Image: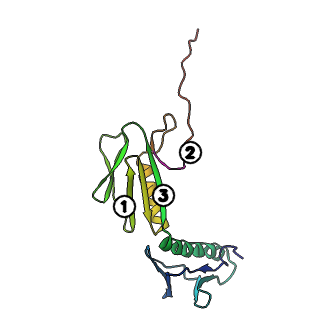
């Protein structure tokens, strides 16, 4: 039995959950989210205990994998509409910076042109200072994907450490070539 899949997802106060027509809708203070779980997964809403339960039909390999996945996706939706998700990125390098251009993020990261990235629906971007980018939203997948796209604009390089990195990311540094006087 899936250890994660069999745990109920408790619904906090102020969050509405609907399970109908093969879709799970979660609505809370930070927004609305919806997923369509795999048809073989049975998702039920327990009104008494205020919890969502996920059950699987049998112990086939695919169903075992989907059991824990479905429960985790619903849990992340509930967490997203209550607390929200946030990824912080730092920009390292002389002259490297970010600024807002209407809704888009304009990155100056050592290329001839600026890179403009527009966040998807439900994702907001804040710039506390020119070298810090904060990506926020209710959908964990969208927040992580957009943060990864910003990082991919200029990944941190190992020699000087220049580029865009996650706030707590450790970049392995390499030593450059050293020239010795050979005989």
Left/right placement of residue 106 relative to residue 83 reads left
Question: Residue 114's x, y, as percent?
Answer: 31, 46
Whole-number angstrom distance, CA of label 2 to CA of label 3: 15 Å
Name the residue: 53% across, 28% down. Answer: 176
The residue lying furthest to the bottom in this view is 48
Query: Which numbered marker is on residue 170?
Result: 2
Choose the circle earlier in sequence order: 3 or 1: 3
Choose the circle earlier in sequence order: 2 or 1: 1
Name the residue: 60% across, 80% down. Answer: 10
| SS at circle 3 | strand
The residue lying furthest to the right in this view is 1
Q: Which residue is mark 1?
A: 119
State which quarter of the image contains the C terminus: top right
- The answer to whether one can see residue 116 in this image is yes
Left/right placement of residue 4 relative to residue 171 reads right
User: Of residues 10 and 21, which is closer to you in this image?
Assistant: 10
- The answer to whether one can see residue 23 in this image is no
Question: Residue 140's x, y, as percent?
Answer: 49, 66
Find the magenta span and give its range. Answer: 164-169
Label 3 packing within 10 angstroms: few (<14), some (14-19), many (20+): some
Choose the circle earlier in sequence order: 2 or 3: 3
Question: Residue 172's x, y, as percent?
Answer: 57, 40
Question: Residue 146's x, y, as percent?
Answer: 42, 59
31 in relation to 23, above or below: above
Magenta span contains residue 165? yes
Query: Which numbered marker is on residue 98?
Result: none
């Amino acid at each position: 039995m899936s250890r994660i899949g069999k745990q109920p997802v408790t619904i906090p106060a102020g969050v509405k959950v609907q399970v109908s027509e093969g879709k799970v809708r979660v609505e809370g203070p930070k927004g609305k989210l919806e997923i369509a779980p795999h048809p073989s997964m049975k998702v039920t809403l327990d009104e008494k205990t205020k919890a969502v339960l996920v059950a699987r039909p049998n112990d086939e390999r695919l169903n075992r994998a989907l059991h824990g996945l479905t429960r985790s996706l619903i849990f992340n939706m509930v967490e997203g509409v209550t607390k929200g998700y946030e990824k912080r990125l730092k920009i390292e390098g002389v002259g490297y910076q970010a600024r807002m251009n209407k809704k888009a993020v304009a990155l100056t990261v050592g290329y001839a042109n600026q890179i403009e990235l527009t966040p998807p629906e439900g994702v907001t971007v804040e710039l506390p200072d020119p070298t810090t980018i904060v990506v926020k939203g209710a959908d964990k997948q969208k927040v992580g994907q957009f943060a990864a796209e910003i990082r991919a604009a200029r990944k941190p390089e190992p020699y000087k450490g220049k580029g865009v990195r996650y706030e707590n990311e450790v970049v392995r540094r390499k030593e450059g070539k050293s020239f010795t006087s050979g005989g």
